């Protein structure tokens, strides 16, 4: 990116009259450029999803493996027929229930979708964001927008522009500041197989919500487990190292809050400069250490909103070990634990 001034839009405090300003980045997208933009989940790094060369630039900018496919973002249902086909009644039901919103459905794609988007698969992930900036941007662009989370591959996704601005600055053509992302974790990813929805990545839309629409849901075992190289997986993204700070992290879990705190207090004595990520309720228990609250353990929205930002910060304190309190794996907790397990590279203690 050359001159920042002409390629940056601050809509973080905007009102509805400002959407017209999105016509400029929309044109950049149409012409093959890369645009960093906010969504309700995390920031996205967007390109024209029908332009093979533009999409390839995303992989370059992120240093992303070419076998990890991208999600196509649409602004309304009328964009779907050009990119996906054979939508079953059950799939329609899911889209109607959860769109616009943090929900991605894997569907068979049409010939118009370049293989750079799908990494050669016969399916593509589609999502209609609910964030006004994202919706208007896609609407003005007039094409589906391919967008992974805006972050260098392996790092936590960006939930505020300042988190990812630096690492992507010279790789994008335009940046839109929309303030902090509301949800803070990436969308729920679902694929319907033999009329049963399979949860491939947990997010704000929970398995319970999917079940209430479809009557059933299968949670892919890799969501809370490690993928082995020789075992086939439904979603390539499950294979990659994700969200991990450079400092080693340990996830400490227990149904008993006091036991969890006691275990961390015991283990941290073995380190010179431990750092702790904990619930607001437990923060005072670690007053002698470097500790940060990720929000209330009884308000998982708070935790999902803040966890990526915190994970991005920890290395800057130069700790020699990071202890992270686990949360219950129910509801939104499943999505939080999916990310924390990966941040800890599956180093976990259950007490
Ligand atoms: O909330 C989100 O989904 C954000 C915002 C920007 O919309 N995007 C996002 O994209 O998280 P990304 O690329 O970071 O994650 C997409 C995930 C990856 O794990 C990928 O492997 C999986 O979706 N995926 C994409 N296409 C797939 C397909 N055809 N079959 C199975 N998994 C797929
Ligand atoms: Mg990502």
Image (spheres, rainbow, N blue to C red):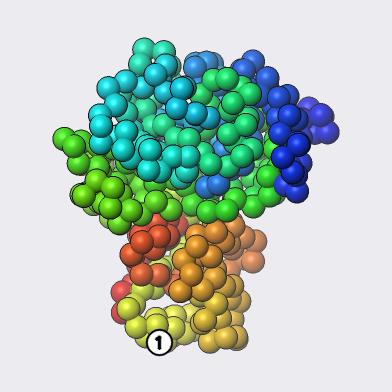
Q: Is residue 216 left or right of residue 273?
A: left
Quadrant of the picture in which ligand 1 is shown: top left
Residue 161's place in the image compared with 54, above or below, is below
Q: Is residue 149 left or right of residue 12?
A: left
Identify the image quadrant of residue 138: top right
Residue 9's place in the image compared with 141, above or below, is below
**Mark 1 sits on what residue?**
258
Which residue lies at the image location 44% right of the left edge and 49% below the top edge? 242
- Residue 166 in sight in this render: no
| Residue 225 placement (x, y as % from top left) | 28, 55
Which residue lies at the image location 31% right of the left edge and 38% below the top edge? 93
| Residue 10 placement (x, y as % from top left) | 76, 41
| Residue 337 placement (x, y as % from top left) | 39, 61
Residue 215's place in the image compared with 169, above or below, is below
Which residue lies at the image location 20% right of the left edge and 41% below the top edge? 196
> Under tag 1, what secondary structure?
helix
Which residue lies at the image location 36% right of the left edge and 61% below the top edge? 331
Q: Is residue 263 left or right of residue 62?
A: left
Q: Nearer the viewer, residue 28 or 208?
A: 208
| Residue 95 placement (x, y as % from top left) | 37, 37
The N terminus: image quadrant = top right
Q: Is residue 87 left or right of residue 126?
A: left
């Amino acid at each position: 990116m050359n001159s920042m001034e002409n390629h940056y839009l601050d809509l973080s405090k905007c009102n509805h009259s400002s959407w017209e300003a999105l016509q400029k980045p929309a044109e950049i997208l149409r012409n093959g450029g890369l645009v960093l933009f906010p969504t309700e989940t995390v920031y996205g790094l967007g390109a024209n999803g029908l332009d093979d060369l533009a999409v390839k630039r995303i992989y370059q900018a992120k240093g992303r493996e070419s076998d990890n496919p991208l999600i196509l973002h649409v602004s309304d249902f009328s964009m779907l027929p050009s990119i996906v086909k054979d939508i079953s009644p059950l799939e329609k039901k899911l889209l109607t229930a959860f769109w616009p919103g943090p929900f991605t459905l894997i569907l068979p794609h049409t010939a118009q979708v370049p293989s750079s988007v799908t990494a050669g698969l016969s399916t593509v992930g589609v999502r209609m964001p609910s964030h006004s900036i994202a919706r208007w941007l896609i609407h003005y662009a007039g094409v589906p927008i391919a967008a992974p989370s805006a972050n260098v591959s392996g790092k936590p996704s960006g939930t505020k522009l300042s988190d990812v601005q630096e690492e992507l600055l010279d790789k994008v053509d335009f940046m839109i500041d929309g303030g902090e992302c509301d949800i803070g974790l990436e969308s729920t990813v679902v694929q319907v197989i033999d009329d049963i929805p399979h949860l491939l990545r947990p997010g704000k839309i929970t398995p319970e919500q999917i079940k209430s629409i479809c009557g059933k849901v299968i949670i892919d075992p890799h969501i809370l487990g490690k993928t082995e190289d020789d075992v086939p997986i439904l979603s390539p993204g499950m294979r990659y190292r994700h969200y991990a700070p450079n400092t080693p992290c340990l996830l400490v879990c227990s149904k008993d809050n006091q036991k969890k705190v006691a275990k961390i207090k015991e283990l941290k004595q073995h380190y010179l400069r431990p750092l702790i990520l904990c619930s607001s309720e437990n923060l005072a228990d670690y007053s002698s250490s470097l500790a940060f609250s990720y929000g209330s353990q009884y308000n998982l929205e708070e935790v999902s909103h803040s966890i990526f930002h915190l994970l991005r910060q920890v290395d800057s304190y130069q700790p020699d070990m990071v202890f992270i309190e686990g949360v219950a794996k129910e509801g939104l907790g499943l999505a939080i634990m999916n990310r924390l397990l990966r941040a800890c590279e599956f180093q976990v203690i259950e007490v």
